[in-house]
Image (tube, helix red, strand yellow):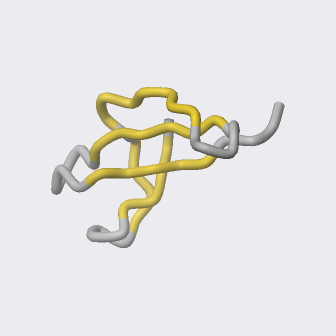
Amino acid sequence: MEAYCVKCKAKKEMQEAQEVTMKNGRKAMKGKCPDCGTSMFRIMGNK
């Protein structure tokens, strides 16, 4: 899963990606940046 790293300011492939459900019921992916280790988060579509 690809996501944007705020610290590196670039899109990168997420490591240790896990699917999570937010409070409003929408799905999202949570992981870490492979280079700097910063948390990455990507909101998924409704489908």
Residue at image position (27%, 70%) is 7
Image coordinates of residue 27 in percent, x first then y, are 64, 35
Nearer the observer, 30 or 6: 30
Q: Is residue 25 left or right of residue 36?
A: right
Which quadrant is the C terminus positioned in? top right
Give the image quarter of residue 13: top left
Residue at image position (18%, 50%) is 37
Image coordinates of residue 22 in percent, x first then y, are 58, 41
Q: Residue furthest right?
A: 47
Residue at image position (40%, 65%) is 10
Q: Is 39 drawn above or below residue 31 in the view shown?
A: below
Q: Is residue 8 left or right of residue 40?
A: left
Image coordinates of residue 15 in percent, x first then y, are 31, 34
Q: Is 12 drawn above or below residue 19 in the view shown?
A: below
Nearer the observer, 22 or 1: 22
Q: Residue furthest left?
A: 36
Count of numbered marks: 0
